[in-house]
Amino acid sequence: MATSARQQAAQKKITDSEFQRFRDYFYRKTGIQFEESKRYFVDKRLLERMRITGHDSFNSYFTALRFQASGEELQELINVMTVNETYFFREEYQFECLVESVLDEVYSRKKPGEEIKIWSIPSSSGEEPYSIAIYLLEKWPKLDEIDVEIVSSDIDSKVLARCHQGVYSKRSVQHLPSRILAKYFTPLPNNNYQICQDLRDSIKFTQVNLNDVAQTRRYRNFDVIFCRNLLIYFDDASRRRAADVFYDAMNSGGFIFLGHSESMSRISSLFKVRKFPKAMVYQKPLV
Amino acid sequence: MGLKKERNLDIQPVATYERQSTRDYAGLLQQLESSDPSKRRWGARDLANYPQAVDPLLGRILVETEHPVREAIFDSLQQIGGPAVVSGLIPLLRNEDAAVRNGAIEVLQAMPEDVAPHIVELLNDSDSDVRIFAIDILQQLAHPQTPQWLLSVLKDETHINVIAAAVDRLAEVGTTDMLSELKALKLRFPDESYLQFAIQTAIDRIEGA
Amino acid sequence: MKKILIVDDAVTVRMYHRQLMEALGFSVTEAVNGIEALEKSFSEHFDLYLVDVNMPKMDGYRLVQEMRKTPELQAAPVIMISTEESELDKEKAYLAGANFYIVKPAKMDELKTYAAILTGKVL
């Protein structure tokens, strides 16, 4: 068939029934529920994926999606349906929850001489672990009374190198109060900022592959884990395995923060749901 | 006090109890029986590397009381995979404990190729609950024959809850060749208001596509 | 408007009960299992819960037990719903902390009566 004739044959609109079928399926798999108001957003991306994967009809695309054993297309779809931008103080209410509620509870169970360990994974470009460090310094008074170790990991060593350098764009720091920016960052040419040496020394950056048990088994005794906007991109089996890694990496009573559109309800029943004033967090049950 | 500074330390050394219990097969089997649930859980996790552990793992599920240990056992069975795991999990569908049944269903859902040969048999089990669990497995199963299996339920099944479960799945994966069967089903159960609703939903979804 | 959380893993069952409850003047939110139900309960207040027994990850009994252990949810009205019609399961439901137990699918009259009793809403 000539290209233009083929393009004519390809479906151009998603019907209401198709949207409902897709929406129910996506909700079942991810917990993300698309409202009617997101119709344009969803339809556009569906048609695009159909085009890229060479399916002329929603039916054939959906069948392929639904029965693909590898789950690759679903991962792609999740990628395009979720917006993932990283910057300092992203989803700030979770950092507030950390210093206003979670750390106090963790602290209350510590004996003298014990320390608190926090794991931020993936490091991505480092905004998350550095945000945690800044929040602790600025907003958690008990930091004076106990040692806190922040470990941050990523699978990609190039990414870790960039974390060590700590150079960020204006866009990345735009949500920081100017007092914080002035205190912890040095302006560089090209509208960039470098985070101060002291903070760069305060994060232990490590390379790790979450799927490698030999590596992950050595991560133990964490009190708080941040794993935001990573698991949503994993398939069911890997997600479950990652939840296992986190469970075993934590002390009992430890806490884990997921991304705002992520939920343990599709992943694992090992954790307890805890509600604090600023955020909802998952907890490894106390023994 | 305060934030610890990076001192180029190696990652936390492995806890001593792990060094003591060997991570070879015999040692792990023993660990699976430890009185400490967290050791049992680690034993279960490490046994994922030993395909010969299928029977001991299955056996442990029946006596294990701690949820995190059971979860690790199910996950290891999923990682090992294969026909022996499927054959071993199927009897668990009849277990009294919902957590055990659900654990088995979740693993089976992830093993389309190995489960496929058993589906017809499960859909014809004498226990209607087992037939429903088979349809629960089909809910997530990534196997292209799923719609056909569900259609066979519509044709041959008599128990209304089993039919309802199958119709519910068809709202997602129903195809046009099922329309006549669905319409016939509507006529068979005129007084069942939920079933009428579910069948009509499936029909609307299929026709509206 | 009174709010209800419908907890069930089957999409058409949720849709069916949604219709019934909306006709009774409730605003409906859905969850597929006990974990999601707890999460939604922590972000908004519900006047009534319709909880299926058989769900993956956290079933109806465990959900209600968890709710009764949680101060904010201790008194939340729960109608438990299942395909089982047996004394043993009813007992389990009440022991877990459910207020009423009905057999699936809910009939309009039953839902109306129990919803009215539990929420004090004139229907």
Image: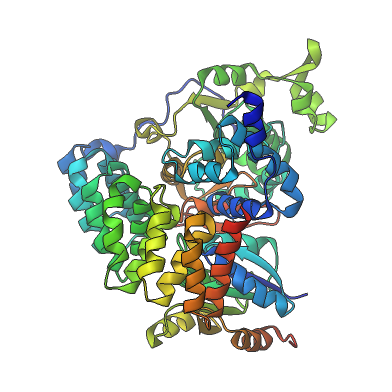
Indicate the position of residue B153 as horizontal and vertical percent values: 38, 65
Query: Could you tell me which residue is drawn at 53 percent across and 43 percent down?
Result: A60
Q: Is residue B151 left or right of residue B31?
A: right
Q: Is residue C12 left or right of residue B16?
A: right
Q: Which quadrant holds the N terminus of chain A? A: top right
Query: Could you tell me which residue is drawn at 63 percent across and 36 percent down?
Result: A9
Q: Which quadrant holds the C terminus of chain A? A: bottom left
Colour treatment of the image: rainbow
The vertical placement of C87 against B39, above or below, is: below
Viewer-closest of A85 and B110: B110
Indicate the position of residue A120 as horizontal and vertical percent values: 56, 35
Q: Give the tally of numbered discs.
A: 0
Q: Is residue C10 left or right of residue B68?
A: right
The vertical placement of A77 against A3, above or below, is: below
Q: Residue furthest left?
A: B26
Q: Residue furthest right?
A: A178
Indicate the position of residue B170 as horizontal and vertical percent values: 49, 60
Q: Is residue A59 left or right of residue A167?
A: left
Query: Could you tell me which residue is drawn at 59 percent across and 47 percent down?
Result: A262
Report whether residue A268 is seen.
yes
Residue A12: image quadrant is: top right
Report whether residue B97 is seen.
no
Query: Could you tell me which residue is drawn at 51 percent across and 83 percent down?
Result: C101
Indicate the position of residue B189 as horizontal and vertical percent values: 49, 79
Q: Residue furthest top?
A: A189
Viewer-closest of B151 and A151: B151
Residue B88: image quadrant is: bottom left
